[in-house]
């Protein structure tokens, strides 16, 4: 496995050919001072940008007309001189200069029109241009890819010490119908009019592109890293994972879906046996934003979150065209990374301890809703990877998981050995029949667009006991030998122009109630609603309580418990080589301001009770950042300690004999 540098910067340099004086204010001393101020161990620097400009003397591509020296080579040497890695960036799917010169390289829809959604080919030169507005180029292992192979070979030949390559914009879309792709599909016996054939061809050709880039690099640089971005670190696109040395999980949580996406992705890629890092940006909103800043404490929260889930860190910046590094940017990055230096030895290269597994459904809304409910209740979890249930006591199947017959057999074997399962909605339903037995039979739909849940006593903690409105309905089930945990009440009628009541939803009909909504049989609990997607979309506290109460019926043997409010996060790892457990505690509540989520207030919370259930004898509990030792009690297999205070992040280390 390639060991990743823990503190990286991804240095964008997408620079218009209309701007003169490229690198005119660059100095080695200024660059190295930025690396030191930022506490960096690696920085990704540019060979070729989205404008199609190269930043070194190239015989293959087009050197930026405003650049008169080898900026790439100078930055590689300067970084190496102070012990910092410098992997090299090459644009792939976007290159404005190449797109202008070679329209035959464009990604096309059926019929030949461009597949680039934000590009107006009829715009006048003075018309305003939207953000992030590029023509998509086709990576079909054809003539454009040959150009990228030549660029790759030139860089590999030119620079003796190459740490790695980063290819960007590699997996935009799922199909292409450019002339080369249509001809290529026909040559392989595929039908361009068949959507499945077109998707299969797209994947095969991108796999070939990745393979050849890797082969070229390893001819001269066998130990260098290689990564393909824009889908290369997507848990739902495993067809691309084998071709990369590591994974860079690009995210801007302020605008790309919030702060709870990264933990699930990190837990997935931790299973692959390869290194992985989280990638955020110093920017307030969009990637590559000049003059946009997050405060240093917000960056600290983000990188501490990455560390908490075992990920190395990368923060995006964009260099000014004149090559002068912004001191405020690296002061903010340094505030974050100086903290990472203090905790990284206790966060990386650990083993998960949780006995709770989650099976990703492939539907982001359901998966993210499930993950949010677990994170907000400090239920640490891991991903079920390649149908391996052996690490787990309990497994969750959110909303819409479909298993093959072979996978279902493995799941049944897990249950037979005492494993516990919570599944929801349409999960584990094949051909109208449940794939495991929850004590009920699947019966389709009640025929309403919404319904109401009434919980029973066993899952009533923190709940209202009146009928609770569900914006989407649950499945119809008929109880066989299961225990009913909750029931459903139907409305009088669906809301239509012909039949409606009040402003929104029709009230519940007390005479059409008592239908089973949640049922338990032994170690299996089924919730008939897509409760995970409901929570993601509507955020009701009662949806979360319903789900967690059902989970708690099964998942009773937790390794770690930390009593925090919903903004708290907790993750535990074991580091056997050091004889210790490391518990990461996080607390931060992002504020939604129209288009962005902002980390601004990081209040201190105090006296957090923590319980660990581990077989080893704990000899010491301490906080490595401050060096403070904490009193603790170990009795009947449970270690109890109170963490005195937490602001942003605290690391609690448990040493054992």
Image (cartoon, rainbow, N blue to C red):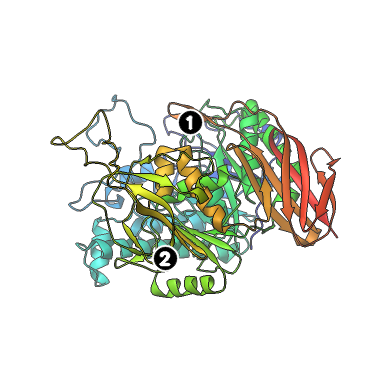
Q: Quadrant of the N terminus?
A: bottom right
Whether residue 105 is situated above or below residue 241 in the rendered picture: above
- Asked whether residue 277 is in view, the answer is yes
Q: Tell me if mark 1 has few (under 14), some (14-19) or many (20+) residues whose alpha carbon lies within 10 angstroms of its own.
A: many
Which residue is located at x 49 percent, y 34 percent?
A: 288
Q: Tell me if mark 2 has few (under 14), some (14-19) or many (20+) residues whose alpha carbon lies within 10 angstroms of its own.
A: many
Q: Say which quarter of the image contains residue 537.
A: top left
Q: Which residue is mark 1?
A: 285
Q: Which residue is mark 2?
A: 439
Determine whether the residue tagged by mark 1 lies in a helix, strand or loop.
loop
* Sequence-first disc among 2 and 1: 1
Tally of numbered tags: 2
- Asked whether residue 52 is in view, the answer is no
Residue 138 position in % (x across, y down): 34, 53
Q: Quadrant of the C terminus?
A: bottom right
**Alpha carbon of mark 2 to alpha carbon of mark 1: how far?**
49 Å
Number of the front mark, 2 or 1: 2
Determine whether the residue tagged by mark 2 lies in a helix, strand or loop.
loop
Q: Who is closer to the viewer here, 76 or 210?
A: 210
């Amino acid at each position: 496995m390639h060991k990743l540098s823990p503190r990286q910067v991804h240095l964008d340099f997408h620079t218009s050919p209309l701007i003169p004086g490229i690198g005119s204010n660059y100095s080695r001393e200024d660059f190295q001072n930025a690396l030191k101020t930022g506490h960096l161990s690696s920085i990704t620097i540019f060979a070729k940008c989205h404008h199609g400009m190269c930043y070194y003397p190239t015989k293959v591509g087009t050197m930026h007309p405003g650049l008169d020296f080898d900026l790439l080579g100078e930055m590689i040497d300067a970084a190496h001189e102070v012990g910092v890695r410098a992997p090299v960036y090459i644009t792939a799917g976007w290159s404005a200069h190449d797109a202008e010169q070679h329209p035959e390289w464009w990604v096309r829809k059926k019929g030949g029109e461009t597949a680039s959604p934000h590009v107006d080919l009829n715009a006048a030169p003075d018309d305003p241009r939207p953000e992030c507005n590029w023509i998509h180029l086709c990576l079909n292992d054809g003539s454009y890819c040959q150009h990228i192979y030549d660029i790759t070979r030139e860089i590999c030949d030119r620079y003796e010490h190459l740490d790695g390559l980063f290819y960007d914009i590699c997996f935009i879309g799922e199909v292409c119908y450019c002339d080369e792709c249509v001809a290529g599909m026909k040559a392989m016996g595929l039908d361009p009019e068949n959507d499945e054939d077109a998707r299969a061809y797209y994947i095969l050709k991108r796999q070939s592109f990745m393979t050849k880039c890797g082969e070229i690099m390893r001819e001269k640089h066998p130990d260098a890293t290689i990564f393909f971005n824009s889908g290369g670190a997507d848990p739902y696109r495993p067809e691309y994972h084998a071709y990369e040395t590591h994974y860079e999980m690009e995210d801007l949580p302020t605008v790309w879906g919030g702060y709870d996406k990264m933990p699930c992705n990190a837990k997935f890629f931790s299973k692959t046996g390869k290194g992985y890092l989280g990638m955020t940006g110093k920017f307030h909103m969009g990637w590559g934003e000049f003059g946009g800043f997050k405060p240093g404490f917000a960056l600290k929260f983000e990188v501490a979150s990455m560390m908490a889930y075992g990920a190395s860190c990368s923060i995006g910046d964009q260099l000014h065209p004149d090559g002068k590094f912004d001191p405020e940017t690296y002061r903010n990055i340094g505030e974050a990374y100086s903290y990472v230096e203090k905790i990284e030895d206790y966060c990386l290269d650990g083993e998960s301890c949780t006995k709770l597994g989650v099976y990703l459904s492939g539907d982001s809304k359901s998966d993210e809703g499930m993950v949010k409910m677990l994170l907000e209740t400090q239920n640490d979890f891991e991903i079920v990877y390649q149908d391996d249930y052996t690490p787990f006591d309990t497994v969750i199947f959110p909303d819409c998981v479909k298993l093959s017959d072979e996978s279902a057999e493995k799941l049944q074997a897990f249950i037979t050995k005492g494993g516990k399962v919570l599944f929801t909605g349409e999960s584990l339903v094949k051909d109208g029949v449940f794939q495991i037995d929850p004590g009920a039979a699947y019966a389709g739909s009640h025929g309403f667009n919404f319904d109401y849940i009434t919980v029973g006593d066993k899952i009533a903690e923190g709940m209202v006991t009146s009928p609770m409105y569900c914006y989407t309905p649950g499945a119809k089930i008929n109880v066989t030998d299961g225990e009913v945990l909750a029931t459903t009440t139907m409305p009088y009628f669906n809301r239509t122009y012909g039949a409606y009541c009040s402003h929104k939803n029709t009230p519940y009909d007390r005479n059409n109630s008592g239908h089973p909504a949640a049922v338990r049989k032994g170690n299996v609990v089924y919730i008939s609603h897509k409760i995970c997607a409901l929570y993601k979309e509507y955020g009701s506290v009662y949806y979360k309580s319903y789900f967690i109460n059902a989970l708690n019926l099964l998942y009773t043997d937790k390794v770690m418990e930390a009593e925090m409010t919903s903004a708290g996060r907790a993750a535990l790892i074991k580091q056997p080589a050091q004889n210790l457990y490391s518990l990461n505690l996080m607390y931060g509540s992002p504020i939604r301001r129209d288009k962005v989520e902002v980390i601004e207030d990081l209040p201190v919370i105090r006296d957090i009770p923590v319980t660990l259930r581990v077989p080893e004898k704990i000899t010491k509990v301490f906080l490595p950042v401050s060096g403070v030792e904490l009193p603790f009690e170990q009795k009947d297999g449970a270690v109890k300690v109170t963490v005195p205070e937490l602001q942003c992040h605290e690391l609690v280390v448990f040493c054992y004999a």
